[in-house]
């Protein structure tokens, strides 16, 4: 497995070792020992899975302290445009985002490839489903705590995420349409 650091400290992309041929593949998705070496002081305690239609945009979500969550995310079926926004106070990249397209394991005629994305606590996270029936999976470093659930606006002009253009309108929950901007969040933090 190849570990790739992004320009935002703490965000990591993992290119998985996938074994297979035109018949199919095998991948060791998670090994506690391996991730303990790659991600110091990180322990995953909860696994979540969501299914989304094409055009569903979820986010940008996070949990406030003391229930902040780090996430190891991947796509089991379909494709997403995945985004993490740095909300760590004092970070030199506060308010900046990193995006990546994640997909189900893909065979290019020669070899299989599959990518995971690690987002430590202190980041808002969201994704846009690029295909119908996309299955998105994430391991979390803390349990879901509804009273600490929070978010920032998905289309905040100050963050300026370049979401992909689609042939359909984004499908966004009423809750996600009401999140504060990053400036409003900082004022209320």
Image: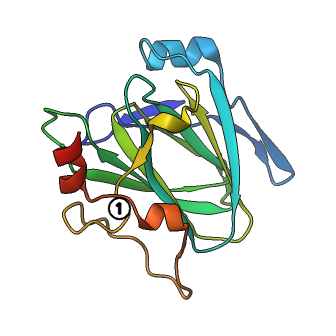
96 vs 55, left or right, is: left
Placement of the N terminus among the 4 image quadrants: top right
How many marks are shown on the rendered structure?
Answer: 1
In the displayed structure image, the side of residue 184 where residue 151 appears, left or right? right
Which residue is depicted at the point 51% across and 13% down? 36
The answer to whether 152 appears left or right of 30 in the picture is left
The residue singled out by tag 1 in the image is 153
Whole-percent x and y of residue 135? Answer: 71, 54
- Give me the residue at 46% from left, 19% from top: 38
Q: Quadrant of the C terminus?
A: top left
| Disc 1 crowd, CA 10 A, few/some/many (<14, 14-19, 20+) | many
Hey, which quadrant is residue 53 in on the image? bottom right
Whole-percent x, y for residue 96 in the image: 22, 51
Residue at 64% x, 27% y: name it: 46
In the rendered image, the vertical position of residue 104 relative to residue 79, given as above or below: above
Taking depth in this image into account, of 138 and 178 the one nearest to the observer is 178
Please indicate, yes or no, whether residue 155 appears anywhere in the rendered image.
yes
Question: Residue drawn at (58%, 21%), measured in percent from left and top?
Answer: 44
Which colour style is shown? rainbow
Does 146 sit above or below residue 40?
below
* Residue toward you, 90 or 163: 90
SS state under label 1: loop
Find residue 70 and report its horizontal and vertical position in percent: 46, 30
In the picture shown, does residue 135 fall above or below 42? below
- Residue 105 in view in this figure: no
**Residue 99: x, y in percent?**
38, 55
Residue at the bottom extreme, as displayed = 167
């Amino acid at each position: 497995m190849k570990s790739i650091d992004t320009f935002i400290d703490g965000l990591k992309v993992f290119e998985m070792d996938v074994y297979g041929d035109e018949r199919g593949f095998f991948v060791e998705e998670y090994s506690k020992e391996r991730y303990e070496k790659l991600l110091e002081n990180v322990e995953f305690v909860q696994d979540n899975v969501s299914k989304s239609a094409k055009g569903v945009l979820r986010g940008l979500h996070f949990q406030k302290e003391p229930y902040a969550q780090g996430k190891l995310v991947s796509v089991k079926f379909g494709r997403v445009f995945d985004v993490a926004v740095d909300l760590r106070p004092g970070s030199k990249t506060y308010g900046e985002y990193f995006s990546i397209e994640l997909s189900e394991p893909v065979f290019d005629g020669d070899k299989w490839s599959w990518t995971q994305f690690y987002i430590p606590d202190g980041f808002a996270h969201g994704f846009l489903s690029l295909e119908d029936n996309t299955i998105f999976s994430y391991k979390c470093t803390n349990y879901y705590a509804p009273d600490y659930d929070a978010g920032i606006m998905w289309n905040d002009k100050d963050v300026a995420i370049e979401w992909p253009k689609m042939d359909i309108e984004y499908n966004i929950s009423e809750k996600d349409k009401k999140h504060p901007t990053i400036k409003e969040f900082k004022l209320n933090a």
